[in-house]
Image (tube, coloured by chain):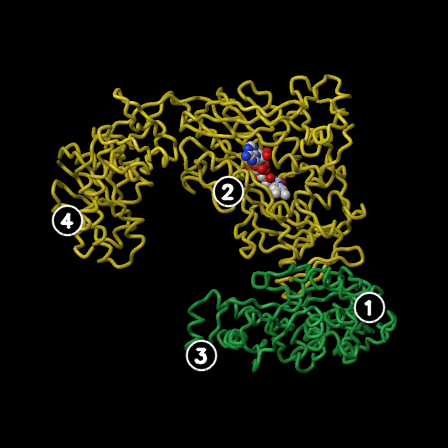
Chain colours: A yellow, B green
Amino acid sequence: MKIGVFICHCGNNISATVDVEQVAQHALTLPGVVCAHTIPHACSEPGQQLIKKNIQEKGLNRIVIGACSPRVHEATFKRVLAQAGLNPYLLEFANLREQCSWVHEDRQLATGKAIDLIDMAVNKAARLEPLTSSKVDVNKRTLVIGGGIAGIQAALDIADSGHEVALVEKTPTIGGNMARMDKVFPTLDCSACILTPKMVEVASHPNVTLYTYSEVEQVSGFVGNFKVKIRKKARLVDMEKCTGCGSCTLKCPVKAPSEFNMGLDNRGAIYIPFPQAVPHIPVIDKTVCSYILKKKCGLCQKICPTGAIAFEQQDELTEEEFGAIIVATGYELMDWTVYGEYGYGKYKDVITSMQYERILSSSGPTGGHIKRLSDGREPEVVAIIACVGSRDAARGRPYCSSVCCMYSAKYAMLTREHLPNAQVYIFYMDIRACSKMYEEFVQRAQEKYGANYVRGRVSKIFERNGRMVLQGADTLLGQSVELEADLVVLAVGITGTQSTIELAKKLNISHDEYGFLTENHPKLRPVESSTAGIFIAGACQSPKDIPLSVAQASSAASKVLGLISHDKLETSPLVAEVTILKCVGCFRCLSVCPFSAIEEQVLRDGTKVAQVNPALCQGCGLCSATCPPAAIALRGFTDDQLISQMESLCQLNPEL
Amino acid sequence: MTKLGYFPGCSLEGSASEYDQSSRYVCKQLDIELVELPDWSCCGAHAAHHTQHKLACALSARNLSIATKQGVDSVVAPCPACYSGLKSAQNQLANNPGLTEKLKSELDLDCNAKGEVFSLVELLSHIEPETLKAQVKVDLGGLKVAAYYGCLLVRPPKLVQFDDPENPTSIDNLLSAAGVQMLPWDYKVQCCGAVLGISNPDIQLKLSGDILKMAQLAGAQAVAVACPLCHANLDLRQEQINKYCKSNFNLPIIYFTQLMGLAFGASPKGLGIDKHMVNVGPLLSKVGIR
Ligand SMILES: Cc1cc2nc3c(=O)[nH]c(=O)nc-3n(C[C@H](O)[C@H](O)[C@H](O)COP(=O)(O)OP(=O)(O)OC[C@H]3O[C@@H](n4cnc5c(N)ncnc54)[C@H](O)[C@@H]3O)c2cc1C
């Protein structure tokens, strides 16, 4: 056994608190250790060279690195071992930074702890075995979930590079929230003009299979080989026969609030969400259709010229295989009705930002005319309240929604373009406009469009003589203010969705308390989820605008292309392994395995024992901890190896 | 019969004795037995919690411990300030065992914070509207009233956990059941100026004036209140408001319990209605009550 120990200063991240020289000196006294070095930056080029040189010159066959968290650099040093001709699994990491120098202040105690950690690592290293990974085929198809701008962009990028994509969208049309918008900051270009062509392109792309009105039901498998069940909900309209003429939608006598128009007007029970919907095919809302509920009506069926109405249609389940998955399920507005003081629901002239988007849109319920919902009058004063549900810890929303400052400025401009004589007031806390051309945009709203910015919160809205009265504070003047307005727009904050949380459970990826998906590393792995082969893009990761959503989508697509450019993937050898002779066939392991990686194996004499499918096993170790006769071992973390670490720790601290 | 500890507080013994009279009357009619806490002490009002957190808590804890000794679990306080003090003390006792121990050892108080603390509005809101309606003997349908809740009755929401903190309806529901026409309006929880009436009357007169203006705009003939301080600011000072705001309000300010009492058939005098500064008589004669 020839063990080499390398202790990293990490600049002074470690050496400021830990006496690295003393740790190295101590390591030299341990059995099997033939050399111990300290290195200013072990991960740097000279650092790596030093390790390689020692392996080759001194014939080292086990390596211990005392540095940062293995999450940061384990892969780097495995590569160093491999380059020096050593099996990469003969490496043991001691985390002297996150678990020692960063969390302690006393140099002497921290050095003592670092010595303990190195002792444990050396003891375990002496018991490491070379491991080899196996290879699995990579399926080249990609699943994109969510058909907003992020999902569409990701699907197009992958499809354009010649690979197959399936795009699954929950609602009857793709387009997401961007489709609701009239004009978009910072350039005020028409949202439909830039989005609709992409919607059409993705739907007609030969490499894209589009599943609208569909949801992911179940996911199994692993990177390179996911198996996904997709539920195609019954539209009750035959998509082959329908020509999208829309006569059925005009005749339907039922009225239900339009989701697309944020409840500002009604749609029929059979409807096409909006004129540019893709696919341009109606859907029947089973919860309100008279024919479905009472077997009465059936008018749509009578007038359909192609006989496309299919009341008998059932949901369909298909199973498909994919090598990679991109989640782009977007956002929704937080529940603004918790702000009782703003009187939403009580006053028709208090509306949400997304409703204002629809009012501004020429294809919206008012044909693009700004009108009050109460009496149809054009407003003379429009007030916008920012941060409704953002940066408000008291209402459980401590974060910034990142787009409201910008769209509030957008509303000031668009309002003045529609109604040049109207006055616009924006109540704000701070103005956050930090991307390219954003500050200039807000300046333009103030200088060219005369938006009145009032710094302060509104505490109450009520009605007086048919107008809305806003009471609040102007914190720059240090005065309370009262403003009479005709229309109030609440700039409601953004939240992750329940639907994303449910999907995250099926995909086994993590999310935060607001329903936003968690990236693998906030700086270095921003579009990778916590599970290999699953990527995230757009506003489902955090509140963001269109430019960032698109950038993230392209980034996720390039990650996918990187993955599927391989024909085969190496699987991790750090998986569980059953010693058949010890297994008693109790199958407790089977019931605890979260990845369904344990199977029953029948031996020739008929006895049943457990068996691990190494392709599915993620190496969590639950089975090994559960197994009563200790018949399952997790490679790289065997009982023998872990106990050796405990032993070295207990020896050093007799009191323990 | 429901039995509860009754904490009248200082106002109900003095300037708001009519609130006390009418509260006791209404509870009796509704089969609620009020056991006045013997030897109750001041709730601490604004002075205590501005001076010392522990003092404020100890004062209310003492009153709660009297209730425990009397064998009544729950306590009702008609005055929102008393209610707020008691409720917050009870909340702290329930969530801070260290504090309970401290009070026990230092002041020899035995407060088990098991019972609940109710405002009178909350307590009466538990009664079925049908039961209330069954008590009604006099038709007050001709009265148009705006219910004014003030700041402490339904706030802070996390502590109180009763009614909507922005648009409360509990008093409206009680008085509707008693047959009064309740008006929707927007100043139900706006500040009346509270104790600024003493230290900074200009602010209080403006704020109280705004409330009266909104009530009048809503078409109210009277304002129903549940707080002695709101009552003083709106009734006692109505003339000063008129001078300050150059207005000529003549709006009776009536405790909600007085209106319920009238509906239940009590005489105006028995409910202390003659004690208000703004004469309620002409309005009552409109609906045939003398
Ligand atoms: C009022 C308002 C105005 C805005 N104005 C602008 C602007 O002017 N300029 C700008 O740059 N940004 C603007 N934004 C931000 C912009 O809306 C977002 O950046 C953008 O829509 C994010 O796109 P996305 O694809 O990530 O999410 P989304 O647009 O939310 O799309 C997500 C899609 O996924 C689908 N989906 C959800 N769950 C599932 C599931 N489980 N299975 C399948 N599909 C699912 C949804 O139905 C939806 O189609 C604004 C935001 C708001 C709230």
Q: Chain of mark 4?
A: A
Which residue is identified by label 4? A25
Is any atom of residue A153 visible in this view? Answer: yes
Residue kind at label 1, given as amino acid type = Val
Q: Is residue A284 above or below residue A369?
A: above
| Mark toward the start of the polypeptide (4 vs 2) | 4
The CA distance from mark 4 to mark 3 is 63 Å
Which residue is identified by label 2? A516
Residue kind at label 3, given as amino acid type = Asp
Q: Is residue A655 above or below residue A202?
A: below
Within-10-Å neighbours for mark 4: few <14, some 14–19, many 20+: some
Residue kind at label 4, given as amino acid type = Gln
Q: Nearer the viewer, mark 4 or mark 2?
A: 2
Q: Is residue A408 above or below residue A634?
A: below
The picture quadrant where one finds residue A307 is: top right
Q: Position of residue A405 (x, y in %)?
A: 60, 48
Q: Secondary structure at mark 1?
A: loop
Q: Nearer the viewer, mark 4 or mark 3?
A: 3
For residue B138, the mark is 1
Within-10-Å neighbours for mark 2: few <14, some 14–19, many 20+: many
Q: Are marks 1 and 4 in contact (CB under 8 Å)?
A: no
Q: Nearer the viewer, mark 1 or mark 4?
A: 1
The CA distance from mark 1 to mark 2 is 59 Å
Q: Position of residue B208 (x, y in %)?
A: 73, 71
Q: Quadrant of the N terminus of chain A?
A: top left
Q: Position of residue B269 (x, y in %)?
A: 79, 79
Q: Are marks 1 and 4 on the same chain?
A: no
Which residue is identified by label 3? B108
